[in-house]
Amino acid sequence: MRISLVATIAVLVSLLGASASWAHHQPAPSSFTLAARGKVSQGLTVRPVLKKRRLIGLVVFKQPRRREVGTVLLGTFSGDPSIHWNLKVDGKRLSSGSYQIDLRVFANGKPTHIPGPRPRHLTISGQHVHVY
């Protein structure tokens, strides 16, 4: 009985390690761009490049101290879709300031630990938005 219990625990540990490893090696978006027409009211266009169908979203950080503002779930996509974002996080439009935008693969409504592409930055000044 004791050997059986030890073997069962060993199998469970290896399965948990394998599932975490599997998630880590899944292709993340290879890159993405943000495009703005100039006015906050018009929002932004997010253009990810995805090799496989993935549930993606944005993690938004307020600069300069990289304080997390929140997450925005964009949906499930593949290829190079064009996705409109109204600059709202948790139902509230971003206020004036500088932000870092990370594109991430999501699972169960939360960002995974799969590394994403290089973050993008945007600045909101009054009613104008600038991406860089």
Image (cartoon, rainbow, N blue to C red):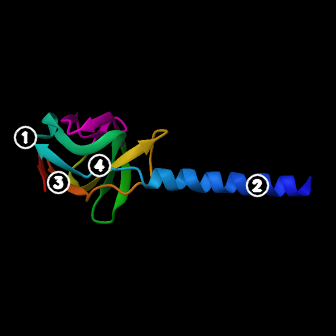
Give the x, y percent position of residue 39: 10, 40
Q: If you read the primary sequence from the N terminus, does the residue marked by circle 2 or circle 1 appear first?
A: 2
Q: If you read the primary sequence from the N terminus, does the residue marked by circle 3 or circle 4 appear first?
A: 4
Circles 2, 1 touching at the beta carbon (< 8 Å): no
Residue 6 horizontal side relative to residue 127, left or right:
right
Image quadrant where residue 132 sits: bottom left
- Where are the magenta residues, as a range? 72-93
Whole-number angstrom distance, CA of label 3 to CA of label 1 = 13 Å
| Amino acid type shown at disc 1 | Arg
Task: Determine crowd level at label 2: few under 14, some 14-19, many 20+ residues with C-alpha closer than 10 A.
Answer: few
Whole-number angstrom distance, CA of label 2 to CA of label 1 = 56 Å
Residue position marked by numbered label 1 in the rendering: 37
Depth check, mark 4 against mark 1: the one in front is 4
Give SS at disc 1.
loop
At horizontal 45% and vertical 55% (from top left) the residue drawn is 24
Residue position marked by numbered label 2 in the rendering: 9
Give SS at disc 3.
strand
Q: If you read the primary sequence from the N terminus, does the residue marked by circle 2 or circle 3 appear first?
A: 2
At horizontal 28% and vertical 65% (from top left) the residue drawn is 64
Give SS at disc 2.
helix
Residue furthest to the bottom: 65
Circles 3, 1 touching at the beta carbon (< 8 Å): no
- Magenta: main secondary structure equals strand
Residue 31 in magenta stretch? no
Q: If you read the primary sequence from the N terminus, does the residue marked by circle 2 or circle 4 appear first?
A: 2
Depth check, mark 2 against mark 1: the one in front is 2
At horizontal 7% and vertical 43% (from top left) the residue drawn is 38
Which numbered marker is on residue 29? 4
| Amino acid type shown at disc 3 | Thr
Which numbered marker is on residue 64? none
